Image (cartoon, helix red, strand yellow):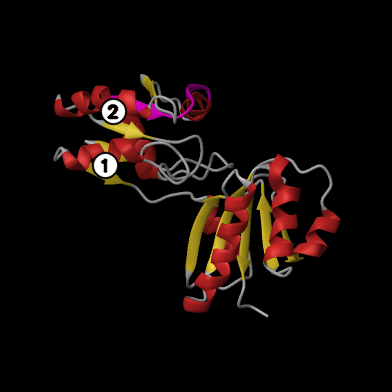
């Protein structure tokens, strides 16, 4: 069986008893970065062989992992932080396992998307996960404009991941393309220095000084 296991997004205590049970009993653990996963496993005194799966080797690793599953191995799939597959590797493996009739399971657990959404003060009943915006400027602006059209059909709140070195650029484009909406900007979620900012994009831009860490940006174009 292949079991998808969410891992803490910051605070190592945010892992379920069931997740620890599977990690302790599985044959091998498929991980994104062996160094990051080793820190978590060491904290809970778990020693298991690690198989590295990332964006560069996922296609090549699929057959190797499927062979192990066919042999009856119990494998756990984790990412560096949060729920695997959500802007992280693993989708191709899961899809291949399903297509080959192999058993899979997914455990509930930590997700920066849900944590940031519930802290945002913006409507959480309907939301759309955008992930990272496109690299090319034209495609980014088109996608931001598309959010306006989506909001006319469904009053959804949007969740966007932003790298620190792209934060100012992203906020500036959102201010211009989406008429300076109210947003929530979260970083270091569940950690000691957790920070969540609220307000119009212009206000948050004025507060930013040397952005560090990954950000979760929440926006809603319907909210007054």
Report the magenta residues as a range. Answer: 25-35
Residue 33 is inside the magenta segment = yes
The residue at the point 41 percent across, 25 percent down is: 46
Identify which residue, 91 or 213, lies in the foreground: 91
Determine whether 16 is above or below 148 in the image.
above
- Residue 85 drawn at (x, y percent): 40, 43
Identify which residue, 53 or 137, lies in the foreground: 137
Q: Secondary structure at mark 1?
A: helix
- Residue 136 drawn at (x, y percent): 60, 45
Q: Which mark is residue 95?
A: 1
Which residue is the site of mark 2? 62
Residue 159 seen in this snapshot: yes
In space, the residues marked 2 and 1 are separated at their CA atoms by 10 Å
The quadrant of the picture occupied by the C terminus is bottom right
- Residue 168 drawn at (x, y percent): 76, 49
Circles 2, 1 touching at the beta carbon (< 8 Å):
no
User: In the displayed image of the protein, which residue is found farthest to the front?
Assistant: 138
The residue at the point 15 percent across, 28 percent down is: 70
Q: Secondary structure at mark 2?
A: helix
Label 2: few (<14), some (14–19) or many (≥20) C-alpha neighbours in 10 Å: some
Quarter assignment of residue 100: top left
């Amino acid at each position: 069986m292949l079991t998808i296991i969410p891992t803490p997004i910051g605070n190592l205590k945010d892992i379920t008893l069931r997740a620890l049970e599977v990690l302790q009993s599985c044959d091998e653990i498929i991980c994104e970065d062996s160094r990051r996963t080793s820190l978590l496993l060491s904290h809970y005194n778990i020693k298991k062989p690690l198989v590295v799966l990332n964006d560069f080797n996922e296609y090549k690793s699929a057959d190797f992992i499927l062979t192990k599953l066919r042999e009856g191995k119990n494998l756990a799939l984790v990412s560096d932080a949060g729920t695997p597959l959500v802007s992280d590797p693993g989708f191709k493996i899961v899809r291949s396992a399903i297509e080959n009739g192999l058993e899979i399971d997914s455990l509930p657990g930590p997700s920066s998307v849900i944590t940031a959404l519930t802290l945002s003060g913006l409507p959480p009943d309907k939301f759309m996960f955008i992930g990272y915006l496109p690299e090319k400027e034209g495609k980014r602006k088109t996608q931001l404009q598309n959010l306006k059209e989506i909001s006319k059909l469904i009053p959804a709140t949007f969740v966007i991941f932003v790298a620190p070195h792209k934060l100012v650029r992203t906020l500036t484009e959102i201010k211009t393309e989406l008429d300076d909406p109210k947003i929530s900007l979260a970083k270091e979620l569940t950690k000691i220095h957790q920070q969540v900012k609220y307000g119009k994009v212009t206000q948050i831009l004025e507060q930013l000084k040397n952005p560090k860490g990954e950000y979760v940006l929440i926006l809603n174009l319907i909210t007054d």
